[in-house]
Image (cartoon, rainbow, N blue to C red):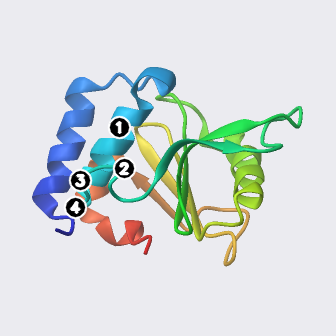
């Protein structure tokens, strides 16, 4: 079942009413509901991996953890609500390279989605979508 305006609006309302935007405590719930809004049963059922280990992914060269990897389509890195996503660009690039360059990278802070396609444009996101605009911008999330 593909995403519908109703399923996307339901996701937006859920996020606004029930999530505070805590990166550690709510990211997995957010991502599972995000996948459900797009017609999947959930993250795992879609074939994605939460907390994907990334060798040499940390600033010190240790193992890092990407919030979600959906190979070969998408890498998602979540940040707390209100966090400046520009600060996490370098981390996204590092994870992208270490995870064999998935097609898209998405940074999200519970309020905004910044979508990158590093094969086409490296410095700026190809799309920036506010959470409340998600139902109107479904095409930006065509990751397959």
Residue drawn at (62%, 66%) of the image: 102
Estimate the spatial distance between the alpha carbons at disc 1 and disc 3, rounded to whole Å: 14 Å
Q: Which residue is mark 4?
A: 39
Q: Secondary structure at mark 3?
A: loop
Residue furthest to the bottom in view is 120
Instruction: Find residue 10 and report its horizontal and vertical position in percent.
Output: 15, 46
Residue drawn at (59%, 71%) of the image: 103
Q: Secondary structure at mark 4?
A: loop
Estimate the spatial distance between the alpha carbons at disc 2 and disc 3, rounded to whole Å: 7 Å
Estimate the spatial distance between the alpha carbons at disc 4 and disc 3, rounded to whole Å: 7 Å
Residue 23 drawn above or below residue 33 = above
Disc 2 vs disc 4: which is toward the camera?
2
Question: Within the image, what quadrant is residue 65 found in?
Answer: top right
Q: Quadrant of the C terminus?
A: bottom left
Q: 139 or 69, which lies in front?
A: 69
Estimate the spatial distance between the alpha carbons at disc 1 and disc 2, rounded to whole Å: 10 Å
Residue furthest to the right in view is 60
Disc 1 vs disc 2: which is toward the camera?
2
**Within 10 Å of the Cα at label 3, are there few (<14), some (14-19), or many (20+) other Cα atoms?**
some
Q: Secondary structure at mark 2?
A: loop
Q: Which residue is mark 2?
A: 43
């Amino acid at each position: 079942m593909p995403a519908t305006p109703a399923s996307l609006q339901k996701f937006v309302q859920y996020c606004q009413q029930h999530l505070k935007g805590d990166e550690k405590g709510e990211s997995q719930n957010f991502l599972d509901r995000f996948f459900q809004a797009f017609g999947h049963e959930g993250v795992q059922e879609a074939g994605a991996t939460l907390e994907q280990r990334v060798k040499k992914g940390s600033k010190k060269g240790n193992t890092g953890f990407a919030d979600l990897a959906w190979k070969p389509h998408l890498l998602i890195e979540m940040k707390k609500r209100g966090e400046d996503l520009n600060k996490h660009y370098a981390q996204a690039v590092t994870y992208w390279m270490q995870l064999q360059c998935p097609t898209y990278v998405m940074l999200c802070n519970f309020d905004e989605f910044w979508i990158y396609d590093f094969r086409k444009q490296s410095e700026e996101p190809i799309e920036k979508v506010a959470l409340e605009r998600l139902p109107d911008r479904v095409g930006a999330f065509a990751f397959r």
